[in-house]
Amino acid sequence: MANILVTGGAGYIGSHTCLELLNAGHQVVVLDNLSNSSAESLQRVQALTQKSLHFIEGDIRDGAGLDQLFQQHKIDAVIHFAGLKAVGESQQIPLAYFEHNIAGSISLAQAMQRAGVFKLVFSSSATVYDEANISPLNEEMPTGMPSNNYGYTKLIIEQLLEKLTIADERWSIALLRYFNPVGAHKSGQIGEDPQGIPNNLMPYVTQVAVGRREKLSIFGSDYDTVDGTGVRDYIHVVDLANAHLCALNNRLNAQGCRAWNIGTGNGISVLQVKNTFEQVNGVEIPFELAPRRAGDVATSFADNRRAIAELGWQPQYGLEDMLADSWNWQKQNPNGYR
Ligand code: NAD
Ligand code: WQD
């Protein structure tokens, strides 16, 4: 069992990962500045697991704070979720994205090096792939120039971390390229709680279902896909959380930097999401067909064979579970953690 620092652990994916880490018997320290989350998520993680974790409200950009954390806790490895993630916002305030995501990751890696901690699992994104690649996307395919500043920060961080492992063989780094995380823990006690109007499809759908939004706008119905709407690879957040535990195990006995896709390998259209949500949950989702959203691609789904073969990871949940669990969370928490 290991002592794990989870940056951004109060957030959507981080809270689910903390729960799985505690259930697996690890000790967990969370560092989060709560800029996009609530400490309530961690209270609920502790209630669900009947185990405690150590929460520090702080920022990854604060090197002195990180030094203190590493002095007070003997950390074996770091899972790094902290950062800003709103694609549209990243076009409005790019410097904030460069600072929190890129400078924040550098600050974290510097503090890790000072503390002699060299195992890192990083939250990357399928957005790093060149848009010219044809799905299923595999890890050998070229990365490209992401169409937005958020994606650009993920690409830069991946490259910086890879160079770090080349320069110093003590580092061992996993780059997990997430596809589209959705769903929630079965209990419905923790889940995705976006601030303001959701950017992503699933929280928008559940907010329409719960009556917080009038109708879903489907962005684009003239793509070259099964029904004209955009196709993505939705992955249950609990499966995604477990991928971090598998990557951690892999990195404890390895050197260097390696990327893994974390998706189910199934391409699902927006209309399929809407229709299946209605069937599984017995709730109607009013919708309109709207113009395409700038920056969207028609189709993106994973070739996940490398993660299955090398990490011993296997997604357990299908689309119906994802949609039922997203709704279970939203229904029990119509206003999220507030
Ligand atoms: P989230 O916003 O729920 O979690 C991120 C957490 O980091 C939040 O709790 C926030 O308060 C914290 N944070 C932000 N800046 C910080 C800073 N400077 N110092 C300390 N804490 C800080 O997002 P999420 O959906 O859980 O995503 C987690 C990670 O996964 C992010 O790096 C995100 O870019 C990446 N990712 C997410 C998706 C997705 O669709 N959700 C897809 C691919 C990659
Ligand atoms: C999915 C599909 C939309 C909202 C983004 C980021 C990516 C990663 C995950 C990470 C698309 C359509 C959406 C709506 C819609 N982020 N849609 N109506 O764009 O695949 O990926 O989130 O941190 O980097 O780019 O996810 O959920 O926004 O969209 O029709 O109200 O749903 O056009 O086809 P996307 P998404």
Image: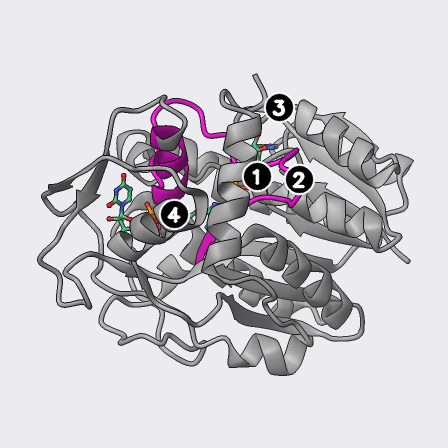
Q: Is residue 281 left or right of residue 119?
A: left
Residue drawn at x 44%, y 43% as measured from the top left: 281
Q: Is residue 275 visible?
A: yes
The verdict on label 1 being within 8 Å of ligand 1 is yes
Using residue 53 as the reference point, say whether residue 205 is left or right of it. left
Tell me residue 88's x, y (percent).
Answer: 28, 36
Q: Give the spatial CA distance, label 1 vs label 3.
A: 10 Å
Percent from the top left, x then y, of residue 55? 78, 29
Q: Amino acid at mark 4?
A: Phe
Describe the element under mark 3 as helix, strand or loop. loop
Return the residue at label 4: 277
Q: Amino acid at mark 2?
A: Ser
Q: Earlier in the sequence, mark 3 or mark 2?
A: 2
Residue 297, position as x, y percentages in the image: 22, 59
> How are the residues colored?
one colour
In the image, what residue type sits under mark 1? Tyr
Q: Is residue 32 above or below residue 273?
A: above
The foreground one among 290 and 172 is: 290
Q: Identify the magenta region.
A: 179-208
Query: 76 or 184: which is nearer to us?
Result: 184
Residue identifier under label 1: 12
Q: Do the CB atoms of the residues marked 2 and 1 lie less than 8 Å apart?
A: yes
The residue that appears at 66% across and 39% down in the rendered structure is 15
